[in-house]
Image (cartoon, helix red, strand yellow):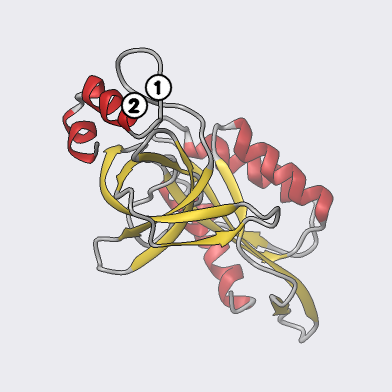
Amino acid sequence: MVAATLLGAWDRVRHSAARLDMAIDGEGPIDLRWELCRIRLEHPNGKRQELYAARTGPVTARLLQISRIDQPQRLFDQVVFDARPLGSIDDGDGQPVYLYAEVEPLHRAGYRAFSIDGVHPGEAVLADLRKVVQAHRGSFQVQSGDGYRLTSPAGEERPGLYAFAAFGPDTDLRVASDALAAVVSRLADPLVWPELAAAAGDDARAEQHRELARDWAL
């Protein structure tokens, strides 16, 4: 099935799947909504990462988790995986979430991801930030936990927020950055995204955010 999938021989994939009691109706590419799984992939620098994904067929899955932002982004890529599980974890409801090794990308979504770092703005503003990213057909995923704390230039401790925002290849990054800035403009403490601002061509905001990052040791 791996070879047939890579070749786009979907009739052969269906035939092989049927022999395993996995009847798949229809013709052409298989892109279904099956169970949650995890995919182990290897980045160009050789580092491995295990990401949550939605299984879309017998040996395919779509990555749902923002990957390392210092490597080519893999969010929403559809990948072909080796069907032999490497292991599993419990999803909390007693159901196994299997781990598979990526064989090769089948479709690259072309997303780019950027970090957002600074003082936690509170749940209401956090929800607004998520809505902004989603409005631009992106994904917003918090990476930090309660243990992430920051110290202000005056020496005061604050709860921190570290998150990833990923956008598709057709997103106007300048518009997205401006929309995020509108949300945080009323905050007393900073949230910064210098790499996004730079990618958007907003050099003034990028430099302002770099200065704030230096002041707050982000």
Q: Amino acid at mark 2?
A: Ala
Kindly indicate the quadrant of the structure image that contains residue 71.
bottom left
- Residue 28 locus on image (x, y percent): 30, 16
Toward the bottom, the furthest residue is 155
The amino acid beneath tag 1 is: Ile
Q: Earlier in the sequence, mark 1 or mark 2?
A: 2
Pointer 1 and pointer 2: residues touching (CB < 8 Å)? yes
Which of the two discs, 1 and 2, sits closer to the camera? 2
Question: Mark 1 highlights which residue?
Answer: 24
- Within-10-Å neighbours for mark 2: few <14, some 14–19, many 20+: few
Residue 65 position (above or below residue 35): below
Question: How far apart in space, not on screen, are marks 1 and 2 (Cα)?
Answer: 7 Å
Q: Is residue 189 visible?
A: yes
In the displayed structure image, the side of residue 84 where residue 194 appears, left or right: right
Any part of residue 185 in sight: no
Residue that sits furthest to the top in the current view: 26
Relative image position of residue 117 (x, y in whole percent): 61, 64
Q: Which mark is residue 18?
A: 2
Q: Residues within 10 Å of mark 1 (few under 14, many from 20)?
A: some
- Secondary structure category for the residue under label 2: helix
